Image (cartoon, rainbow, N blue to C red):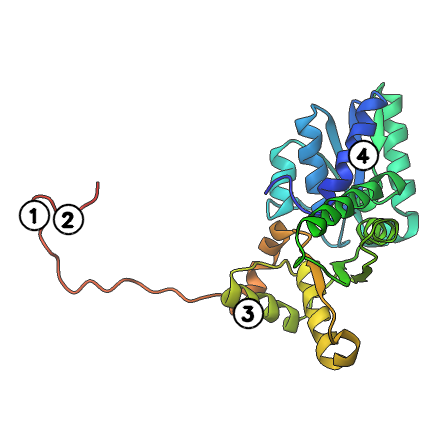
């Protein structure tokens, strides 16, 4: 789980480039519960690179310990260096300039930093999903039943959907790639995530795959003619660690518990009773 989600395919190319350029550390930027930042921190540790994360949070929390929930727990366990900025500072300065400021500081300290953009989304990272299309194409060629007209995926920084769209166009698949937006979830979407988990065992995250699945099914219900007869491949992009940050909001939707009723104490007999 620590190195999982759609960002891993982008990092496969980006981390290789960092190593090829002789980097001894990487810098990237994201939200306080960024799946990309967590995956980057873990991948960097695997390659013996230091990782510097610039995380965006509320101005009320920017001076406080960010805690150990979800992605933050993994990032801090693997030793990532975390710098917090407020949403207002992030909006004013921008992710590129923030990363450049930290890069300049590290260069002055004699380090060799490599900057990875938000979400790992650039021309190099996009190759991760062009390659994913090649793998899907092979599966389609091996099975007459595995064919689809549309690829639906949650869309954030855009690298995943760009790779799918370009790869599909260049391949024999010619499927239409459709990206659905992400970010703050509603109470209806959280209930949907809980309902899907209870009904199917499939766990969706509340920010990406949950919102995308909810939006896709909502559009199918509202515009049935648009989807009629089409086969859809929905790509689950991971992000489950972010679910822990929503524990309080999900508490009323999660399953119940109870104290086991023990009416009387049954004395242990030889061969029965306690397992250990």
Q: Residue at x 79, y 76 (%)?
A: 226
Q: Are marks 1 and 2 in contact (CB under 8 Å)?
A: yes
Q: Residue at x 59, y 48 (%)?
A: 69
Horizontal arrangement in the rendering, residue 151 relative to residue 69 (left or right)? right
Q: Which mark is residue 269?
A: 1
**How far apart, in angstroms, are the residues tagged by discs 3 and 4?**
37 Å
**How far apart, in angstroms, are the residues tagged by discs 1 and 2?**
6 Å
Q: Are marks 3 and 2 in contact (CB under 8 Å)?
A: no
Q: Position of residue 110 (x, y in %)?
A: 85, 18
Q: Is residue 210 visible?
A: yes
Specify which label sits upstream in the sequence, 4 or 1.
4
Q: Which mark is residue 273?
A: 2
Q: Secondary structure at mark 3?
A: helix
Q: Which mark is residue 195?
A: 3
- Establish if 150 lies above or below 58: below
Location of mark 4 (residue): 14
- Establish if 248 lies above or below 17: below
Horizontal arrangement in the rendering, residue 243 relative to residue 26 (left or right)? left
Specify which label sits upstream in the sequence, 3 or 1.
3
């Amino acid at each position: 789980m620590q190195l999982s989600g759609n960002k891993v395919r982008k990092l496969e190319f980006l981390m290789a480039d960092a190593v090829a350029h002789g980097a001894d550390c990487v810098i990237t930027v994201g939200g306080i519960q960024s799946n990309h930042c967590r995956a980057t921190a873990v991948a960097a540790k695997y390659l013996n690179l230091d990782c510097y994360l610039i995380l965006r949070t509320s101005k009320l929390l920017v001076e406080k310990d960010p805690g150990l929930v979800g992605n933050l727990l993994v990032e801090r366990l693997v030793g990532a260096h975390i710098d917090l900025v407020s949403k207002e500072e992030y909006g004013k300065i921008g992710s590129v300039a923030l990363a450049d400021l930290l890069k300049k500081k590290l260069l002055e300290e004699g380090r060799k930093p490599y900057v990875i953009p938000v979400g790992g989304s650039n021309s190099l990272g996009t190759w991760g999903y062009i390659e994913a299309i090649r793998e899907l194409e092979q599966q389609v060629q091996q099975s007459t039943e595995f064919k689809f007209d549309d690829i639906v995926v949650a869309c954030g920084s855009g690298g995943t959907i760009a790779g799918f769209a370009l790869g599909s166009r260049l391949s024999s698949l010619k499927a239409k790639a459709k990206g659905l937006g992400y970010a703050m979830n509603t109470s209806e979407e959280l209930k949907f995530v809980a309902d899907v988990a209870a009904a199917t065992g499939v766990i969706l995250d509340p920010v990406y795959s949950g919102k995308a699945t909810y939006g896709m099914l909502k559009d199918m219900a509202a515009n049935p003619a648009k989807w009629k007869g089409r086969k859809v491949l929905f790509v689950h992009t991971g992000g489950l660690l972010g679910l822990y940050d929503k524990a309080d909001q999900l508490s009323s939707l999660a399953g119940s518990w109870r104290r086991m009723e023990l009416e009387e104490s049954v004395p242990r007999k030889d061969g029965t009773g306690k397992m250990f």
